[in-house]
Amino acid sequence: MIDGLIKSKIDPLWEAMATPLVRARLTPNQVTFAGLILVTLTSALYLWHAMPLVYGLTLALSFVFDALDGAVARRRNMRSRRGGYFDAMVDRYQELIVLGTLGYMHDAWPLALLALSGSVFTSYAKARTAIETQINNDNWPDFFERMERVIFLCVMLVLAGALSAHGDRIVTYGLALFALLAHITALQRARRAAQMLATLDRERQ
């Protein structure tokens, strides 16, 4: 939702931040893969240092880097369907890594699984619709999309670190809220898809 509302304003910012990557002649797929490596590294380090505040801040930096692949693609005129597919797959693996790390570190496996499944269903609801009919990829202004999920996780970890006495509780409640919002968004998308497809079915009769 946030990305859809401020896309026209935030894209120039991403493109400006991507200037060093463009000058280095990195491809969008290389930037995407580098984002995956950074998220994996920061998550592995969290297993060692166990400081939510550090994890939240380094994760935010990793996700900012990951967001620059689209800007590089626009700046270098290298947008492609293959790149979009690769980016979407990497996004899912990043969420798996982060939520798996949180489930392990905070002994919250059931909540981490519910959170991950909500994210996957949110993505799948739109992807499955695209199999049935052509859709506008940008016209899905849903409540808890990827940017919101990323911001939520980073803020949750920063709060858990700042209020260390309640850190585990903040992460536990945060994962529960994350899971709830993700599944609500998945259902929101499923409802929109059902309406779209029902309209198409009536038109074909």
Image (cartoon, rainbow, N blue to C red):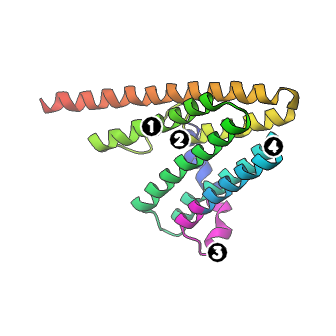
Q: Nearer the N terminus, badge 2 or badge 3?
A: 2
Disc 2 vs disc 4: which is toward the camera? 4
- Return the residue at label 2: 4
Q: Amino acid at mark 4?
A: Ala
Badge 4: residue crowd in 10 Å (few <14, some 14–19, many ≥20): some
Q: Which secondary structure class fits the magenta region best?
A: helix
Q: Position of residue 97 (x, y in %)?
A: 62, 46
Amino acid carrying mark 1 in the image: Trp
Question: Which residue in the structure is indicated by mark 3?
Answer: 23
Q: Amino acid at mark 2?
A: Gly
Q: CA distance from mark 4 to mark 1?
A: 37 Å
Question: Residue 51 got which mark?
Answer: none
Residue under label 4: 50
Which quarter of the rendered picture does the N terminus lie within? Answer: top right
In the image, residue 18 lies in the stretch drawn in magenta: yes
How far across and down, in percent of the image, does residue 5 sit? 55, 39
Pick the front one: 69 or 115: 115
Q: CA distance from mark 2 to mark 1?
A: 8 Å
**Mark 2 or 1 closer to N-term?**
2
Marks 2 and 3, how far apart at CA: 28 Å
Q: Earlier in the sequence, mark 4 or mark 3?
A: 3
